Image (tube, rainbow, N blue to C red):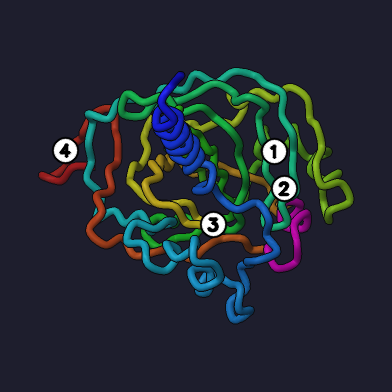
């Protein structure tokens, strides 16, 4: 007969493993928008997020929060990071109206990127208007976040900012589906196979820094990659994304956060020197 203490030790070990591996899921962004919004003075706006729930305290106490202003005088130009290695693949996707944004989620992931030797699988993308990140203090009309997750639950986000101009081809593919989930008439819609490679970046240059989720619980340790090139989106596309969500999220951008002592890198394939300065 086995020693009862053996069963107890086994049970404790199992409980520890279950607890340990369930932690990353609690650090993901909140999908139920009813408890927070983007309206200043509403009591649920960005300035209050850290007080709404104990587990959201990082939103006010964190020292590595996102988004930030990518200020050129703070940027370190580097070439050692290497090109962003994207190995995306077409996968079945679902479009969701989360109230505070429109999100497209790929079933079982849609390929991956590699950051510092770690593989991060593409899980979803969603849009913020106006842009959350600013460049030298300038805000843009739209920003898309491509959210990736590693096997141990770490998060890497690729962000692309847009200004008004020619329509974005990726959004053009989805316009009909977005209209279907607008105003909560249809909360969720299967959109079939979607190729994330159609979400164009258009530049090898990118900013890299360590930050956080930009919605509660504002989890830190997120690896951010912001594509340097500013792409274009039509006024109609931005208007549709704003009209599709709840009234208190038509402008769903969290204000920029203090950079503190963080390092911001700008990857360029090759450094160019002009009058002693590098760009």
Give the residue at mark 2: 237
**CB under 8 Å between callouts 2 and 3?**
no
Is residue 253 visible in the rendered image? The answer is yes
Work out whether 115 lies above or below 139: above
Work out whether 133 lies above or below 175: below
Q: Earlier in the sequence, mark 1 or mark 2?
A: 1
Mark 3 residue crowding within 10 angstroms, few (<14) / some (14–19) / many (20+) = many
**CB under 8 Å between callouts 1 and 2?**
yes
Q: Residue furthest bottom?
A: 41
Q: Please give left or right for residue 55 compared with residue 36 in the image.
A: left
Q: Earlier in the sequence, mark 4 or mark 3?
A: 3
Q: Which numbered disc, 2 or 3, marks the residue closer to the eye?
A: 3
Please provide the residue range marked out in magenta: 239-249
Cα separation, mark 3 vs mark 1, equals 23 Å
Residue 120 tag number: none
Q: Earlier in the sequence, mark 3 or mark 1?
A: 1
Cα separation, mark 1 vs mark 4, equals 38 Å
Residue occupying image coordinates x 32% and y 23%: 117
Mark 1 residue crowding within 10 angstroms, few (<14) / some (14–19) / many (20+) = some
- Picture quarter with the C terminus: top left
Look at the numbered disc 4 and give the secondary structure of its residue.
Answer: strand
Q: Position of residue 241 (x, y in %)?
A: 72, 51
Mark 4 residue crowding within 10 angstroms, few (<14) / some (14–19) / many (20+) = few
Q: Earlier in the sequence, mark 2 or mark 3?
A: 3
Q: Earlier in the sequence, mark 1 or mark 4?
A: 1
Magenta: main secondary structure: helix
Give the residue at mark 1: 171
Give the residue at mark 4: 273
Mark 2 residue crowding within 10 angstroms, few (<14) / some (14–19) / many (20+) = some
**CB under 8 Å between callouts 1 and 4?**
no
Any magenta on residue 234?
no
Q: Residue furthest right?
A: 185
């Amino acid at each position: 007969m086995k020693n009862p203490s053996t069963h107890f030790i086994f049970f404790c070990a199992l409980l520890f493993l279950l607890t340990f591996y369930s932690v990353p899921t609690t650090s993901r962004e909140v999908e139920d928008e009813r408890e927070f919004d983007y309206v200043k003075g509403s009591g649920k706006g960005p300035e209050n997020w850290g007080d709404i729930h104990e587990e959201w305290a990082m939103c006010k106490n964190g020292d590595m929060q996102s988004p930030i202003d990518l200020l050129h005088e703070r940027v370190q130009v580097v070439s050692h990071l290497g090109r962003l290695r994207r190995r995306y693949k077409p996968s079945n996707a679902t479009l969701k109206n989360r109230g505070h944004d429109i999100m497209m989620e790929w079933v079982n992931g849609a390929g991956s990127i590699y950051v510092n030797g770690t593989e991060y699988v593409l899980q979803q993308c969603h849009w913020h208007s106006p842009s959350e990140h600013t460049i030298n203090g300038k805000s843009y009309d739209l920003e898309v976040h491509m959210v990736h997750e590693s096997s141990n639950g770490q998060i890497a986000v690729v962000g692309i900012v847009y200004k008004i101009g020619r329509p974005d081809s990726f959004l053009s593919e989805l316009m009909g589906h977005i209209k279907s989930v607008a105003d909560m008439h249809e909360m969720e819609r299967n959109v079939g196979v979607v190729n994330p490679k159609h979400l164009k970046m258009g530049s090898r240059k990118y900013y890299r820094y360590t930050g956080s989720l930009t919605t509660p619980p504002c989890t830190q340790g997120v690896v951010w990659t912001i594509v340097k090139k500013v792409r274009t989106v039509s006024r109609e596309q931005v208007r549709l994304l704003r009209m599709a969500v709840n009234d208190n999220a038509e402008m769903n951008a969290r204000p920029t956060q203090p950079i503190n002592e963080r390092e911001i890198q700008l990857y360029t394939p090759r450094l160019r020197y002009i009058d002693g300065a590098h760009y």
